[in-house]
Image: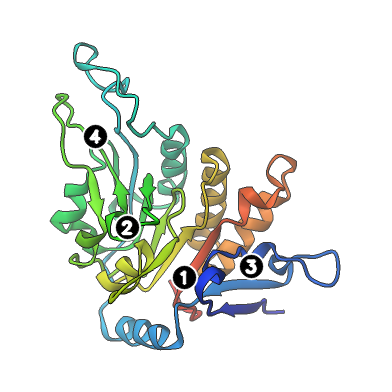
Amino acid sequence: MKQRRLLVVGDGMLHYVPFAALPLASDQTIVDRYEVVHLPSATVMTTLRERELQRDSQPKTLAVLADAVYAADDHRLPERLRRYSPLALRDLPYTRKEAQAILSLLPPEERLSAFGFDATAELVRRGPLRSYRILHFATHALFDEDRPELSGIALSMFHKNGTAQDGFLRLHELYTLTLPADLVVLSGCRTGLTRKAQGAGLLGLTHAFFYAGATRLLVSLWDVNDQATAELMTFFYNGLLTDGMSPSEALRSAQLLLRAQERWQAPVYWAGFVLEGDFHEVFF
C-alpha cells in the first residue's frame, strides 16, 4: 500500500514544530503513518513545480561539500602556522564519514566531492554546482534570529598554506546565485529556521535556496547531533539513490531506521530534519 503523505503549510511558530514526532491517538507518532512535507505556501509550491517542469535536468547527480576547516588551530593546517582561536567554529568529525558514505553510492563521473580546504564558499560562488541535481552541505550554518539577513553557511576559512579566506556564504549572496538543484540538503544545525523581516517577508536559508533555483530542501530545526545526523543521512541517501524512493519516502524511512536504534530513539536525534518544497513523486 502506498504510504500516505502529510502536507504542512505552517505559519509563525508552526515552522518550528517537528510534525514527524507528534503523537497520534494510538501509541504511534505521525512518522509511523505518514511521509511529511512542509510547504511555505500553495503559491510557492506551484511556482516550484512550474519552474522544475520548464528546465532541463542537470547532467550530474550529486555534489558534496563537507569537513571544512574553520579554526586557526585545526590539525590540518601546517603546525608552524596554527594558533589558538577560542571563538572559531569547531570541526565536525563525522561529516567526512557522512559524505564518504553518500558518495560511495554513485560512480565517480556522477559526483563531486569537496572536503577540507576544498570545501569553500568560492566553489559555490564560481558556479560548477549548477551541473548537479543534488547539493549536500555537511557543514556549520549560522542563523541570526535578531538579524536573519546576516545568516549563512560556514565553509573553509583557510587555504592550505594557512592564509585566511572568506568562507562565509551569506544569505544575501545565496539570493544572487543560480543553483537549479532538484534537492539541496543542509546537514547542519538550525538550517531550516526563518524570521519575518519588515518589507522582505520570510528570511532564511530555505527561502534563499528556493530563490536561487532549488526545488526542495532537507533542513534542520535545531542543533543536531553530528554522529546521529551522519547515520540519518546515510539511510536517507540509500533510500533515495539505491532504492529509488522519493525524498519524502527516503526521509521517513531514514527517520524510522534511526529511531529503531536504542541509542538514537529519542526524537531529538531524528525528528529535527524536515523536507521543504515540492512533493511530487517523480525524482529519478
> Which is in the foreground here, disc 1 or disc 4?
1
Label 4: state its secondary structure. Answer: loop
Query: Label 1 vs label 2: CA separation?
Result: 22 Å
Q: Amino acid at mark 4?
A: Phe
Which residue position holds label 1?
276
Query: Label 3 vs label 4: CA separation?
Result: 37 Å
Image coords of residue 162 (percent x, y):
17, 24
> Which is in the foreground here, disc 1 or disc 2?
2
Sequence-wise first label, 1 or 2:
2
Residue 19's label in the rendered image is 3
Q: Amino acid at mark 1?
A: Glu
Relative vertical location of residue 257 with respect to residue 264 in this rendering, above or below: below
Image quadrant assignment for residue 145? bottom left
Image coords of residue 274 (percent x, y):
53, 63
Sequence-wise first label, 2 or 3:
3
> Which is in the foreground here, disc 4 or disc 2?
2
Image coords of residue 96 (percent x, y):
41, 37
Image coords of residue 83 (percent x, y):
25, 17
Which residue position holds label 2?
147
> Which is in the foreground here, disc 3 or disc 4?
3
Which residue ends up furthest to the right in the rendered image? 26
Which residue position holds label 4?
117
Query: Label 1 vs label 4: CA separation?
Result: 30 Å
Label 2: state its secondary structure. Answer: loop
Mark 1–mark 4 CB contact (< 8 Å): no
Q: Residue at x 22, y 63 (%)?
A: 130
Q: Nearer the viewer, residue 10 or 183?
A: 10
Q: Nearer the viewer, residue 235 or 207?
A: 207
- Quadrant of the frame with the C terminus: bottom left
Sequence-wise first label, 3 or 1:
3
